[in-house]
Image (cartoon, rainbow, N blue to C red):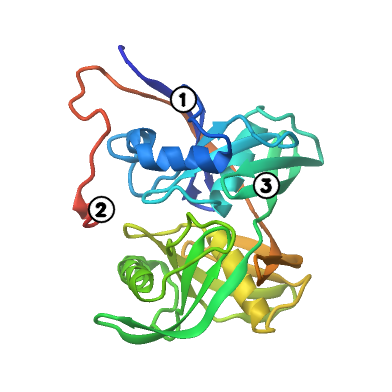
């Protein structure tokens, strides 16, 4: 075999959502901070295209690049590459990265618990992993401070009429709609329609509402639409269905950790969830993330919560992505049958 590029990857998923981790073969990008490095990855697109485009990738895949941390206390750092974005943070990807670091032996595992400090593009996140028999069985991530932005605002969406939506940040930016009001019961067979409508709602929100992060002027758009299920109170805490539409048109297989954080921020802002309470989000495939409000803080002048999310991750394989010098598609390709119109 011949190759002019070899990228070493440990593949993983967190509660169903793919989050591969590049562990070798890629030089750290330029930048004085992890955020600046992630902006280079986003602008340059060479690595993103190589690992996310077909034939190596696909619309279903997220890929994380391990890089040396910039913060002296961090154990590792990672840059998240999603199909259309290079975001500040991701819950499922942070769980995949933590699982690969521990199960892959990159960070020494301590049983029954291992504690790590990871550096995401959006900031530091604390990780606590429950470990047994050489496996990180459950990952707890103290996510970035999360806040509600706009509550109960009207959004006109062509073909759907006027919707009442919330907007929030949970490590990434969301427009949130009531799934039941939209006619969805959050079942697997609804995935295609949720993905299709979610992209339209997200695009409409970006045009009509806009998003701004008080401390990160680079992040000025909505990434996702969360179809939020009805919240039920159980003996174990709050519980609700969740389906997140991801650009360019797919549904997150996991319950989406940043969406869970954003929804907890909205519920807290409405007085419907208190500090110390938990919310378990259930995905279309029945997998779950559990969130807890650890405390409150501020992001700029906005009230915010300190969320913790938890879920499970599994390694699915080890891959070496290669590039033959005669390959006519060195950065891969996309077609609108799965990637949507660009």
Q: CA distance from mark 3 to mark 1?
A: 23 Å
Sequence order check, earlier mark of 2 and 1 = 1
Q: CA distance from mark 2 to mark 1?
A: 27 Å
Crowd class of label 1 (few under 14; some 14 to 19; many from 20; radius 10 Å): some
Please provide percent x and percent y for residue 310: 67, 56
Closest to the observer, 143 or 336: 143
Q: Which residue is mark 2?
A: 338
Closest to the observer, 219 or 179: 219
Left or right, residue 198 beside residue 232: left
Closest to the observer, 244 or 31: 31
Sequence order check, earlier mark of 3 and 2 = 3
Give the label, 2 or 1, closer to the camera. Answer: 1
Q: Is residue 204 above or below residue 140?
A: below
Sequence order check, earlier mark of 3 and 1 = 1
**Whether residue 73 is visible:** yes
Q: What residue occupies the far top of the structure in this picture?
A: 2
The residue drawn where x is 43% and y is 71% is 187
Which quadrant of the figure contains the N terminus?
top left
Query: Mark number for residue 26?
Result: 1
Query: Mark number for residue 103?
Result: none
Label 2 element class: helix
């Amino acid at each position: 075999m011949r190759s002019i590029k070899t990228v070493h990857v440990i593949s993983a998923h967190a509660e169903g959502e793919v989050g591969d981790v590049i562990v070798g073969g890629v030089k750290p990008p330029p930048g004085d901070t992890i955020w600046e490095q992630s902006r280079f990855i986003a602008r340059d697109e060479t690595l993103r295209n190589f690992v996310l485009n077909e034939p190596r990738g696909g619309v279903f895949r997220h890929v994380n690049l391990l890089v040396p941390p910039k913060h002296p206390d961090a154990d590792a750092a990672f840059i998240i590459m999603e199909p259309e974005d290079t975001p500040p943070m991701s819950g499922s990807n942070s769980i995949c990265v933590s699982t690969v670091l521990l199960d892959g032996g990159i960070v020494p595992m301590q049983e029954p618990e291992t504690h790590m400090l990871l550096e995401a593009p959006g900031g530091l996140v604390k990780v606590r992993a429950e470990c047994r028999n050489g496996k990180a069985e459950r990952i707890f991530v103290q996510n970035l401070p999360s806040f509600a932005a706009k509550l109960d605002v009207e959004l006109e969406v062509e073909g759907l009429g006027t919707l009442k939506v919330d907007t929030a940040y949970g490590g990434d930016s969301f427009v949130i709609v009531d799934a039941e009001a939209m006619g969805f019961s959050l079942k697997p067979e609804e995935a295609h329609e949720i993905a299709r409508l979610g992209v339209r709602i997200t695009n409409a929100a970006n045009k009509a509402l806009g998003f701004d992060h008080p401390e990160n002027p680079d992040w000025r758009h909505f990434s996702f639409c969360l179809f939020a299920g009805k919240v039920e109170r159980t003996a174990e805490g709050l519980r609700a269905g969740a389906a997140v539409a991801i650009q360019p048109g797919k549904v997150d297989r996991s319950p989406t950790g940043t969406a869970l954080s954003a929804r907890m921020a909205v519920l807290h802002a409405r007085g419907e969830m208190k500090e110390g309470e938990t919310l378990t989000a259930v995905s279309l495939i029945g997998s779950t993330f559990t969130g807890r409000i650890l405390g409150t803080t501020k992001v700029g002048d906005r009230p915010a919560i300190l969320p913790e999310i938890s879920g499970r991750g599994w390694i699915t394989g080890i891959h070496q992505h290669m590039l033959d010098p005669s390959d006519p598609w060195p950065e891969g390709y996309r077609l609108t049958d799965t990637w949507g119109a660009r």
